[in-house]
Image: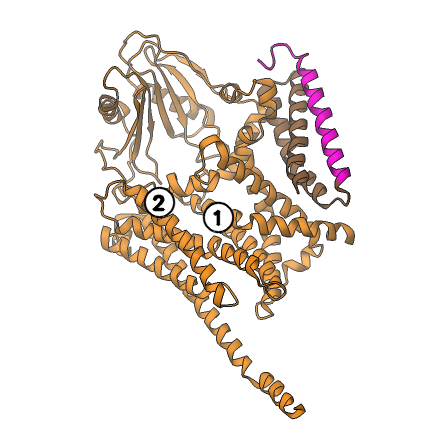
């Protein structure tokens, strides 16, 4: 249950953050990119939560959510460093 | 859909419903009431039952003197004025709403279109109580309530998706309702039927509800791209304009010409008349003053109110808030949720489908309770059953008790609006305690007693309105108080439905008692004696 709630939010957060910085890097306005990937992450959230809740192996769920989140957040901060004037 | 997937999704569907069902019913119920928020406000604030102004209200002649009065009251002892805000009257809210913010605090008032200052409402009304209860449970500090409601909404979305997977026979379920079957069967039939019938609305309303508060509850992009500064994000997203006060006193230019220019600009673009929603004056009386004029969105879905910013001294158009395509789409999705557009049929559909959401969750919850009553029936079951009772009939009782208090509490009562809120929460707690105590001695929650109470309170509220305001149906009809007539009709329908439900529950209980001593039971007793 904890994995489903916290892990889903974290994974979606990583996706929203990575999408926002990549979108900005590709020329979108920061507010536009933040909103677009926020909306997409929200659409994905219930599906990820249901997968996390219904999956048989809890360990695999935790691992997938943790790895997915870490990779996305790390990439987001890495890409942000390449966006001029972002994050200030 | 494979059987294994359906089985895997059954428990998240069930437990999300049991854990968050009560909260979701409250959110859906308050959201349904919010559809008719202005009408309920007119009912709860009798002084605002005034005629709709036929011509546009002059800001300079009507609003400005009142704003200056408010400013004089608040800006004492060297306090500086931050801004003025005027909400213009419309067909559903026929009064001016004015607010002044100063460095010493804020003050507000309501006035008629002729400039008559109305007495303090003495109530929070639907707009300041039922509405915030819907979107943040009145828990504003730290946005805690927003987070809880958003979590419940995402759980609802997950519940809807898993519900579609579980009920593979979605088309058959739509045509299956056996009201005279065993309660468990009837409840599940009704749960499936409502679930299928209202599925598109429920998916839309839960998704769009979270979309409105997305930057608050999901600040991923904001954290990385704006350093977590929400104000900067909003300023960027909807292109707001701001500038500091200059510190030099300069008289504000007349406001009516600016409002007229805004109207003309919008009319030229849309090809029809556009009404003004709000006029904000930032730094009034300062050389840095600017005026923000926004439009009414009664002719379109979006919540984007197309703000125009004018210089408060020269009247020059400084800026126009235009969002980009994605933020524009977000504003449309938010508009789908808030149903600000002028369409009575859709408003009623929103209201009924919102109540359908309450029925969907309640039937699911009751099905779960019925199923476990025989197997468990212990203390834990009683707690869930009492909670279910408090969040279904209980929340209706609390709402109606607040309406009764609104009409019966003396107008001069100090902090009258808080007394109404106290009545709401005490009644609500009372229904939970009543259910808990009842369940100690009876096998099921006190549905019948609480249904009778719902009916009684609805009738009392309606009659109390007639007596205390003299706005009985004939008078309301003659005076054109459609909002009052509508709320009274809603109360009458609530009372009839509640009394009918109580009567049906009583008949069912009698039937069960009759059956207990009927031929089946006698046959068992008889067989037992013969064997003995």
State how far apart marks 1 and 2 are (Cα). Answer: 16 Å
Per the image, the residue denoted by label 1 is B26
* Label of residue B421 in the image: 2
Residue B230 appears in the rendering: yes
Q: Position of residue B78 (x, y in %)?
A: 25, 14
Residue B209 appears in the rendering: no
Chain A is which colour? Answer: brown
Q: Quadrant of residue B110?
A: top left
Tell me the residue at 72%/42% (across/down): A51
Q: How many marks?
A: 2
Chain identity of mark 2: B
Q: Look at the image and say whether residue A70 sits in the magenta stretch.
A: yes
Q: Residues within 10 Å of mark 2 (few under 14, many from 20)?
A: many
Camera-nearest residue between B247 and B509: B509
Q: Is residue B425 left or right of residue B330?
A: left
Residue farthest to the bottom, as pictured: B530
Camera-nearest residue between B392 and B267: B392
Q: Quadrant of residue B84?
A: top left
State the SS at label 2: helix
Colour orange, chain: B
Tell me the residue at 36%/11% (across/down): B245
Q: Look at the image and say whether residue A69 sits in the magenta stretch.
A: yes
Q: Earlier in the sequence, mark 1 or mark 2?
A: 1
Q: Quadrant of the C terminus of chain B?
A: bottom right
* Label of residue B13 in the image: none
Q: Are marks 1 and 2 in contact (CB under 8 Å)?
A: no
Eye-nearest disc, 1 or 2: 2
* Most common secondary structure along the magenta stretch: helix
Q: Position of residue B44 (x, y in %)?
A: 31, 46
The boundaries of the magenta stretch are A59-88
């Amino acid at each position: 249950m904890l994995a489903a709630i916290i892990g889903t939010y974290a994974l979606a957060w990583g996706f929203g953050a990575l999408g926002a910085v990549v979108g900005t890097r590709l020329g979108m306005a920061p507010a536009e990119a933040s909103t677009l990937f926020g909306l997409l992450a929200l659409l994905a959230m219930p599906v990820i939560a249901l997968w996390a809740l219904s999956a048989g192996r809890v360990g695999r769920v935790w691992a997938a959510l943790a790895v997915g989140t870490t990779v996305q957040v790390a990439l987001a901060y890495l890409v942000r460093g390449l966006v001029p004037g972002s994050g200030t | 859909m494979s059987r294994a997937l359906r089985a895997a999704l059954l428990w998240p569907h069930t437990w999300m419903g049991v854990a968050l069902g009560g909260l979701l019913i409250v959110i859906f119920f308050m959201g349904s009431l919010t559809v008719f928020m202005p009408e309920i406000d007119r009912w709860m604030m009798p002084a605002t039952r005034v005629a709709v102004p036929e011509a546009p209200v002059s800001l300079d002649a009507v609003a400005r003197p009142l704003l200056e009065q408010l400013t004089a009251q608040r800006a004492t002892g060297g306090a500086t004025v931050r801004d003025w805000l005027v909400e213009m009257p419309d067909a559903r809210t026929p009064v001016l709403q004015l607010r002044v913010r100063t460095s010493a605090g804020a003050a507000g008032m309501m006035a008629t279109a002729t400039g008559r200052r109305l007495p303090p409402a003495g109530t929070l009304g639907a707009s300041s109580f039922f509405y915030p209860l819907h979107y943040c449970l009145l828990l504003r500090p730290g946005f805690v309530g927003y987070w809880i409601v958003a979590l419940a909404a995402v759980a609802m979305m997950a519940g809807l998706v898993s519900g579609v997977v579980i009920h593979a026979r979605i088309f058959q379920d739509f045509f299956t309702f056996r009201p005279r079957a065993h309660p468990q069967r009837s409840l599940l039939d009704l749960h499936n039927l409502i679930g299928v019938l209202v599925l598109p609305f429920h998916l839309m309303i839960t998704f769009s509800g979270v979309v409105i508060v997305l930057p608050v509850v999901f600040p991923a992009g904001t954290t990385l791209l704006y350093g977590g500064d929400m104000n900067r994000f909003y300023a960027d997203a909807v292109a707001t304009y701001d500038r500091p006060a200059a510190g030099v006193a300069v008289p504000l230019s007349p406001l009516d010409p600016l409002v007229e220019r805004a109207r003309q600009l919008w009319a030229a673009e849309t090809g029809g008349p556009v009404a003004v929603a709000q006029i904000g004056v930032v730094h009034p009386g300062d050389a840095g003053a600017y005026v923000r004029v926004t439009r009414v969105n009664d002719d379109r879905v979006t919540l984007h109110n197309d703000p125009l910013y004018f210089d408060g001294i020269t009247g020059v158009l400084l800026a126009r808030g235009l969002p980009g395509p994605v933020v524009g789409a977000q504003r449309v999705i938010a508009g789908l949720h808030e149903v600000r557009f002028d369409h009575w049929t859709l408003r009623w559909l929103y209201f009924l489908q919102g109540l359908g959401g309450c029925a969907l969750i309640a039937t699911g919850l009751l099905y779960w309770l019925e199923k476990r009553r025989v197997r468990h029936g212990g203390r834990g079951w009683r707690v869930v059953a009492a909670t279910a009772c408090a969040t279904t009939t209980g929340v209706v009782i609390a709402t109606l008790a607040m309406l009764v208090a609104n009409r019966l509490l003396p107008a001069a009562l100090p902090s009258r609006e808080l007394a109404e809120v106290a009545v709401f929460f005490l009644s609500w707690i009372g229904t939970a305690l009543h259910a808990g105590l009842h369940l100690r001695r009876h096998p099921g929650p006190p549905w019948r007693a609480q249904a009778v109470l719902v009916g009684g309170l609805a009738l009392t509220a309606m009659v109390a309105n007639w007596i205390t305001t003299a706005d009985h149906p004939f008078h309301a009809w003659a005076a054109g108080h459609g909002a009052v007539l509508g709320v009274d009709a809603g109360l009458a329908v609530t009372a009839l439905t509640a009394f009918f439900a109580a009567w049906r529950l009583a008949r069912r209980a009698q039937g069960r008692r009759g059956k207990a001593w009927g031929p089946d039971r006698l046959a068992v007793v008889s067989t037992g004696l013969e064997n003995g």
